[in-house]
């Protein structure tokens, strides 16, 4: 599973396209595109720390800053394994932004149920069960999982993010292009957001 990802990443690391020259095309965003504060979260959907950050920070942030137009929040896929890559592919099949973030929250909430074991077929079936609640049928999910163009885009974005943001672990968080190094605690995170408003 990891070998396949490593091979694909090696192939795409030589592609000279700078996707991050136009950040609006990259990642999944919610909130005012013209917001004064843009938060970028580079995460792998199988990463427990990413799930913890999303659970502890995103929900409060949405109510207080995203829904009020003060903050734009962006999820940037940075899959560390095949299971995370497949979950990311299904996430991108959910076309509505609000629904996409609801799906993202559900993926993180149920992470300890689907992201277990080494049998990718069982993992895919568990992901399908989640996807069925988000207007995706089984055939559509299968199609998404086999979509090489989406896979190439995700892996290409990962390579470009690695080059630009020097990511060494997930989640890596940037607030207005400045790396957030603090704890995943909402009160501390909120202080940094307010500083940038």
Image: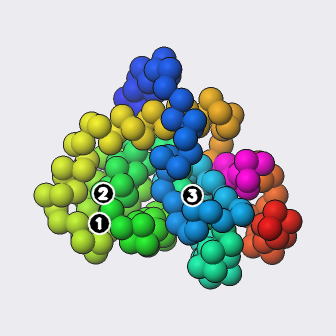
Percent from the top left, x then y, of residue 35?
66, 65
Residue at image x 72%, y 63%?
Answer: 36
Residue at image x 78%, y 71%?
Answer: 190
Residue at image x 19%, y 52%?
Answer: 142
Q: Is residue 48 visible?
A: no
Percent from the top left, x then y, of residue 51?
57, 63
Q: Which mark is residue 93?
A: 2
- Quarter of the rendering occupied by the C terminus: bottom right
Magenta span covers which residues?
171-178
Q: Mark 2 to mark 1: distance in Å?
A: 9 Å
Tell me if residue 173 is in the magenta stretch: yes
Percent from the top left, x then y, of residue 56?
66, 72
Please, what secondary structure does the residue beneath circle 3 have? strand
State the residue in front, 100 or 185.
100
- Does 16 sit above or below residue 72? above
State the residue in front, 138 or 125.
138
State the residue in front, 59 or 95.
95
Q: Is residue 70 visible?
A: yes
Tell me if residue 117 is in the magenta stretch: no
Q: Which mark is residue 74?
A: 3
Proximity of marks 2 and 3: CB atoms separated by less than 8 Å: no
Q: Which mark is residue 131?
A: 1
């Amino acid at each position: 599973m990891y070998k396949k990802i490593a091979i694909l990443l090696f192939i795409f690391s030589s592609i000279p396209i700078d996707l991050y020259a136009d950040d609006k095309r990259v990642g999944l965003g919610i909130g005012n595109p013209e917001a004064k504060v843009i938060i970028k979260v580079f995460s792998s959907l199988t990463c427990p720390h990413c799930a913890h950050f999303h659970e502890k920070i995103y929900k409060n942030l949405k109510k207080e800053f995203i829904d009020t137009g003060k903050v734009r929040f962006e999820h940037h896929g940075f899959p560390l394994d095949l299971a995370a890559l497949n979950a990311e592919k299904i996430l991108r099949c959910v076309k509505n932004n609000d629904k996409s973030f609801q799906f993202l929250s559900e993926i993180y909430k149920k992470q300890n149920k689907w992201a277990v074991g080494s049998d990718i077929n069982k993992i895919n079936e568990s992901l399908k069960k989640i996807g069925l609640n988000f207007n995706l049928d089984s055939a559509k999910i299968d199609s998404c999982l086999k979509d090489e163009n989406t896979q190439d885009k995700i892996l290409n974005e990962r390579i470009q993010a690695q080059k630009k943001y020097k990511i060494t672990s997930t989640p890596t968080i940037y607030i207005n292009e400045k790396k957030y190094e603090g704890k995943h605690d909402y009160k501390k995170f909120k202080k940094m957001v307010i500083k940038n408003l």
